[in-house]
């Protein structure tokens, strides 16, 4: 057995595995020889994933709602049953969604829901599955963050805030868990060709755009969405980064994917804040002239 093969013969749990990055990672890991517990809320999609892989020894679907303590506890019990109490070796915290819209138009309920899934849900799952890793004195936690956790954009403030929080939590967990042999990495994707952007843009439709101060801009949401989609990278670049963070001997703390976006982060940091603000405002049409009719 080669060292590379040995590394992939581990038990992996992936949250949010019913679509996008999580689903692609689940299929990839199963093909690489890992034992995968693919979790999510939509049982029909998990069943379809099981059928696609076609090997229950490699991949099993498991109901898990990161916002439901009882669901998390049931998932822990089920995995303990399947692993004779050994638990998982790798936790991929992928579940999440993007809430898009002007901050003034997002009420407390919707803002809390964003943090419940992207932040509190991530920590609830982590607390539930880390004890088994601590007992073994080894493990990996891979948090799927976003470049949105490094750069703030207009109309993405709620999502940005949740992903900035994931950055801080990942940094603290990395230091706190290292003495127990547990590595923590964060993946920071840019625009990726999944259904994520369409779902996120759908949250704009939940707003009363006609009553918004930003109505002229929100009316162009579809056009902005299509323009942003031209920047998409294939999901495989993210899966490769997750694989490295999960299985390589010396995982990095951060993986910006695609790597070319690292230059964007550096450029943003080097640009004076007021100038960067002006560039981003102009890119989204946030000008006094454009907004004057709705003020």
Image (cartoon, rainbow, N blue to C red):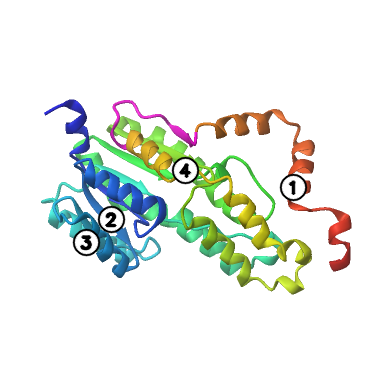
Q: Which mark is residue 169?
A: 4
Going from N to C along the chain, the mark reached first, 3 or 2, is 2
Q: Which residue is mark 2?
A: 38
- Badge 1 density bin: few <14, some 14–19, many ≥20, Cα 10 Å: few
Q: Could you tell me how far apart the alpha carbons at marks 4 and 2 are, in whole angstroms?
A: 23 Å
Residue 167 is a magenta residue: no
User: Which image quadrant is residue 108 in?
Assistant: bottom right
Identity of the residue drawn at 58% across and 61% down: 201
Q: Is 45 situated left or right of 217 in this image? A: left
Q: Could you tell me how far apart the alpha carbons at marks 4 and 1 are, in whole angstroms?
A: 31 Å
Identity of the residue drawn at 47% across and 58% down: 195
Going from N to C along the chain, the mark reached first, 3 or 1, is 3
Q: Which residue is mark 3?
A: 51
Q: Which residue is mark 1?
A: 283
- Badge 3 density bin: few <14, some 14–19, many ≥20, Cα 10 Å: few
Image: magenta residue range: 246-258
């Amino acid at each position: 057995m080669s060292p590379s093969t040995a590394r992939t013969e581990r038990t992996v749990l992936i949250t949010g595995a019913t679509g996008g990055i999580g689903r692609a990672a689940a299929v990839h890991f199963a093909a690489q020889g890992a034992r995968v517990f693919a979790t999510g809320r939509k049982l029909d999609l998990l069943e379809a994933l099981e059928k696609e892989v076609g090997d229950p020894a490699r991949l099993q679907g498991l109901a898990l709602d990161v916002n439901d303590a009882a669901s998390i506890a049931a998932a822990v019990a089920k995995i303990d049953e399947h692993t004779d109490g050994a638990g998982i070796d790798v936790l991929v915290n992928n579940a999440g969604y993007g809430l898009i819209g002007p901050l003034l138009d997002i009420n407390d309920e919707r803002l809390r829901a964003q943090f419940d899934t992207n932040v509190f849900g991530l920590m609830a799952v982590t607390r539930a599955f880390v004890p088994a890793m601590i007992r073994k004195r080894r493990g990996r936690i891979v948090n799927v963050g976003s470049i949105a956790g490094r750069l703030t954009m207009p109309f993405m403030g709620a999502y940005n805030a949740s992903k900035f929080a994931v950055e801080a939590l990942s940094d603290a967990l990395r230091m706190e868990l290292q003495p127990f042999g547990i590595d923590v990495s964060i993946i920071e994707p840019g625009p990726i060709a999944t259904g994520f952007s369409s779902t996120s843009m759908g949250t704009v439709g939940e707003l009363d755009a006609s009553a918004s101060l930003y109505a002229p801009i929100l009316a162009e949401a579809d056009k902005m969405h299509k323009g942003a989609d031209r920047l998409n990278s294939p999901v495989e670049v993210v899966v490769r980064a997750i694989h490295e963070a999960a299985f390589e001997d010396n995982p990095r703390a951060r993986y910006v994917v695609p790597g070319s976006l690292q230059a964007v982060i550096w450029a943003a940091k080097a640009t004076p804040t007021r100038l960067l603000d002006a560039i981003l405002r102009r890119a989204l049409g946030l000008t006094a002239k454009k907004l004057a009719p709705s003020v």
